[in-house]
């Protein structure tokens, strides 16, 4: 039995007399100490157990909630990431998943007449079933096998009939809203101080179309009461509309494009493996705009045609609504979207459609790696290099490894796609562990954009702007040209908020968070200070708490300040911001992406999020305001991340018929990561970077685990970390240790943090060392978190 506890072991329970042995994958309720927990059966054996074992309390499903292959994978993933199987299962199973395969029975007319001649057990069942009502088998009188036999006999005689489980409710019509008749000037007064109200209006303006109540709630948090009052004030107009069913209706519309020869070769190689049930791990390395999506879609079709299923992982589904729509359009019956923004109920419904086999093509983020597809023939990992495939909280698994295990077990094709593959993938391809499938050309031989590196050290100051200007002259000139031609642009600034910190000009005080060792970020045009790590928000003080100085300056720029400056420079160009603050309002990100897609806005300003896989054909210019932010992170992946970000954002330009340009502003114009990205030189960058990784024994040439020891008490954290270091050093050779040392972020949310890094040539050695050194119970007041193959080391 796997229980969702942070304990890396399973638990044994016995089955009460008469209850049939639940199969692996079935959920059960069990007593655990004083509590009752839900667990998943991982192993069921018909053997007597000793007296100390407790009985399980209730069996929740009749059929497993996931196929056996998936259960096995969850176990192996847990093992490979030093996590608990129960926690892995819990993080992928929808919390409100209804009982799987629970059959309900209703009494037939024949049954009501036959009642008299039934045997006692059968009769009890018939009496429990009042006409018109359907009852779950486990709620019928009787026990275990006897009850099942009685039900079977009654069903054979036609006295009772299986009724399908009640469908989750689905109403036909819903309320929709559009902007109301009131004029802009009056709207201000009518809105008053309603913040939600403002967000609703902004959303509808951004979308340029009516939106359903549910959509508005998801994006802004405004509920029916807010909307009703806005309608009453004339701010909105409401009407009833047919609810758009989540399963797009209409016949399947296959793709109309004919694949290029490179696309065909890739599709053929993948499809052959799917048909032959052969494990086929491949790296689809295709420059930006080379048509990787078309390859995925055709491979999915091949999997469905072979009677198998497919899983398509994307880094962040809210940013790629187009992919989800395309999947639904091409596979209306079989497509399912496992969305992080779905409600628990919707998630459960989607899971159940997949589990029952109704849906066989799934698109979703990291957690969709565990979609309960019965016979998967294909796993696609789009933008394979994206670090969101690694979960940062417990259980710290990597979805890429999870699908690799599943593909191997199922004899499936495994396609990692990227224009800027991770060093792990580059190395695996070089060693032949991944078959390299290349798309070397953009569609229609469109050129890659011309990249100009702008040296910020030489950029003259401007009279109307303090310090180094946000927008350099070459970038400004180019943007002016682009907007004059009615084309679109993307501006990347890798920081959200108004400014990275506030500084007292008199004494240099920088307003650090009281609980974290970082400066607070300035938000709301300078009115708020927010800690990005613990979320604490305080109003901006009027004076320095240290020296009472009154000259406080917001230093540097985040997306908010960039947008403000953009509006000054281009007052007539509609723009929107895409960053975590927009995306936190669920649905907010897809509204911005949609506005860009439909041309409602001409400029997209944002963080890393603007670089992720979008296909906006009218974008002809990209500006990177600061390429240096990530370069200085104390992380061995900082050059790789910088290269990928620059190459990816550059790839958003010139995807239509007009060639694109990119301006990269930097203080380090000579840095290899920046230069190679400007030259679109993936192979050159990978060769140099892999050399560095090999020389310093970093992944992919070593297996790495980070152990983080933390406590509100600095001494306790330090001595626990030292103890751990001592144990590790006493282990046999073959292990390289770094630390214990204070983590780069030494204090977070009031906890002091110490880090131990361990590296070895293979994963087994790392796991064995962890097994031998991590205590089951950490010392009092101390937490120990293990991250195997961490994606960041802060
Ligand atoms: P990538 O993911 O490799 O960056 P996309 O899959 O977004 O590229 O494709 C870029 C554009 O090319 C898309 O608009 C897509 O519809 C189009 N496209 C893809 N394959 C073909 C093809 N064979 N013929 C014509 N257009 C294509
Ligand atoms: Zn903080």
Image: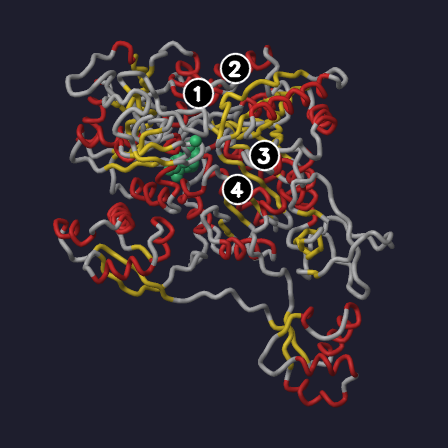
Q: Is residue 749 left or right of residue 277?
A: left
Q: CA distance from mark 2 to mark 1?
A: 10 Å
Indicate which disc, 2 or 1, sits on the residue closer to the N terminus: 1
What's the coloring here? secondary structure
Q: CA distance from mark 1 to mark 4?
A: 25 Å
Q: Are marks 2 and 4 in contact (CB under 8 Å)?
A: no
Indicate which disc, 1 or 3, sits on the residue closer to the N terminus: 3
Could you say which quadrant of the image residue 97 lies in?
A: bottom right
Tell me the quadrant of ligand 1. top left
Q: Residue 689's mark? A: 2
Residue placed at 46% from the left, 19% from the top?
633
Q: Are marks 2 and 1 in contact (CB under 8 Å)?
A: yes
- Measured from the top left, where is residue 602 in percent x and y? 24, 36
Check disc 4: other Cα within 10 Å, few if <14, some if 14-19, many if 20+: many
Check disc 2: other Cα within 10 Å, few if <14, some if 14-19, many if 20+: some
- Measured from the top left, where is residue 569 in percent x and y? 18, 28
Task: Determine the secondary structure under disc 1.
Answer: helix
Query: Label 3, on which residue?
Result: 398
Q: Is residue 211 left or right of residue 274?
A: left
Indicate which disc, 1 or 4, sits on the residue closer to the N terminus: 4
Circle 1 or circle 4, nearest the eye: 1
Q: CA distance from mark 3 to mark 4?
A: 15 Å
Query: Label 4, on which residue?
Result: 312
Q: Is mark 2 within 8 Å of ligand 1?
A: no
Q: CA distance from mark 2 to mark 3?
A: 22 Å
């Amino acid at each position: 039995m796997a229980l969702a506890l942070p304990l890396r072991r399973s638990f044994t329970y016995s089955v009460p007399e008469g209850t049939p042995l639940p199969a692996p994958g079935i959920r059960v309720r069990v007593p655990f100490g004083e509590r009752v927990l839900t667990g998943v059966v991982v192993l069921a054996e018909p053997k007597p157990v000793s007296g100390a074992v407790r009985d399980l309390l209730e069996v929740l499903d009749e059929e497993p909630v996931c196929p056996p292959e998936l259960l096995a994978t969850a176990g192996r993933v847990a093992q490979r990431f030093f996590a608990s199987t129960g926690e892995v299962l819990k993080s992928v199973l929808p919390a409100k998943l209804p009982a799987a395969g629970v059959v309900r029975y209703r009494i037939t007319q024949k049954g009501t007449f036959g009642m008299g001649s039934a045997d006692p057990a059968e009769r009890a069942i018939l009496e429990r079933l009042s006409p018109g009502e359907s009852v779950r088998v486990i709620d019928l009188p009787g026990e275990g096998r006897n009850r099942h036999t009685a039900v079977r006999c009654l069903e054979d005689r036609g006295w009772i009939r299986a009724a399908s489980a009640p469908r989750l409710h689905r109403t036909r019509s819903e309320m929709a809203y559009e902007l109301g008749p009131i004029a802009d000037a009056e709207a201000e007064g009518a809105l008053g101080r309603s913040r939600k109200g403002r967000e609703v209006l902004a959303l509808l303006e951004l979308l340029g179309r009516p939106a359903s109540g549910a959509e508005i709630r998801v994006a802004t948090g405004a509920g029916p009461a807010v909307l009703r009052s806005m309608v009453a004030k004339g701010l909105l107009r409401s009407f009833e509309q047919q609810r758009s069913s989540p399963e797009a209706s209409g016949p399947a519309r296959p793709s109309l494009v004919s694949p290029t020869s490179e696309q065909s070769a890739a599709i053929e190689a993948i499809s052959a493996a799917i048909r032959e049930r052969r494990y086929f791990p491949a790296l689809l390395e295709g420059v930006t705009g080379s048509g990787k999506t078309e390859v995925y879609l055709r491979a999915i079709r091949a999997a469905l045609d072979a009677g198998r299923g497919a899983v398509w992982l994307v880094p962040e589904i809210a940013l790629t609504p187009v992919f989800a729509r395309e999947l639904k359009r091409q596979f209306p019956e079989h497509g399912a979207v496992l969305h992080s923004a779905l409600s628990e109920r919707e998630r459960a419904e989607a899971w159940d459609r997949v589990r029952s086999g109704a849906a066989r093509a799934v698109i979703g983020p990291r957690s969709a790696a565990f979609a309960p597809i019965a016979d998967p023939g294909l796993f696609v990992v789009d933008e394979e290099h994206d670090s969101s495939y690694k979960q940062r909280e417990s259980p710290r698994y990597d979805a890429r490894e999870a699908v690799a295990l599943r593909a191997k077990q199922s004899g499936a094709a495994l396609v990692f796609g990227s224009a800027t593959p991770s060093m792990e993938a580059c190395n695996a391809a070089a060693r032949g562990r991944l078959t390299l499938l290349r798309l070397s050309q953009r569609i229609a031989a469109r050129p890659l954009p011309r990249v100009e590196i702008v040296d910020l050290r030489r950029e003259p100051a401007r009279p109307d702007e303090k310090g180094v200007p946000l927008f350099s002259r070459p970038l400004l000139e180019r943007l002016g040209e682009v907007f004059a031609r009615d084309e679109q642009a993307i501006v990347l600034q890798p920081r959200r908020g108004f400014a990275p910190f506030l500084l007292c000009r008199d004494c240099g005080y920088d307003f650090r968070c009281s609980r974290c060792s970082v400066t607070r970020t300035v938000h709301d045009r300078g009115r708020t200070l927010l800690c990005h790590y613990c979320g604490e928000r305080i109003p901006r003080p009027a004076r320095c708490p240290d020296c009472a100085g009154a000259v406080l300056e917001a230093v540097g720029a985040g997306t908010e300040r960039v947008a403000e400056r953009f509006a000054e420079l281009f007052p007539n160009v509609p723009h929107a911001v895409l960053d975590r603050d927009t995306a936190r309002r669920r649905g907010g990100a897809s509204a911005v992406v949609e506005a860009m897609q439909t041309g409602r806005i001409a400029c997209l300003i944002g963080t890393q999020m603007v670089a992720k896989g979008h296909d906006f054909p009218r974008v002809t210019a990209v500006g990177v305001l600061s390429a240096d932010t990530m370069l200085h992170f104390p992380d061995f992946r900082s050059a790789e991340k910088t290269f990928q970000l620059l190459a990816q954002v550059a790839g958003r330009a010139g995807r239509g018929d007009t060639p694109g340009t990119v301006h990269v502003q930097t203080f380090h114009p000579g840095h290899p990561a920046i230069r190679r990205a400007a030259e679109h030189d993936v192979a050159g960058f990978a060769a140099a970077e892999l050399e560095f990784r090999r020389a310093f024994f970093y992944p992919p040439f070593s297996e790495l685990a980070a152990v983080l020891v933390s406590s509100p008490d600095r001494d306790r954290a330090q001595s626990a970390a030292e103890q751990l270091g001592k144990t590790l050093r006493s282990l046999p050779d073959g292990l390289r240790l770094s630390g214990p040392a204070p983590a780069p972020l030494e204090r977070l949310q009031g906890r002091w943090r110490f880090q131990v890094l361990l590296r070895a040539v293979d994963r087994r050695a790392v796991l064995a060392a962890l097994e031998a050194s991590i205590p089951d119970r950490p010392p009092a007041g101390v937490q120990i978190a293990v991250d195997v193959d961490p994606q960041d080391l802060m």
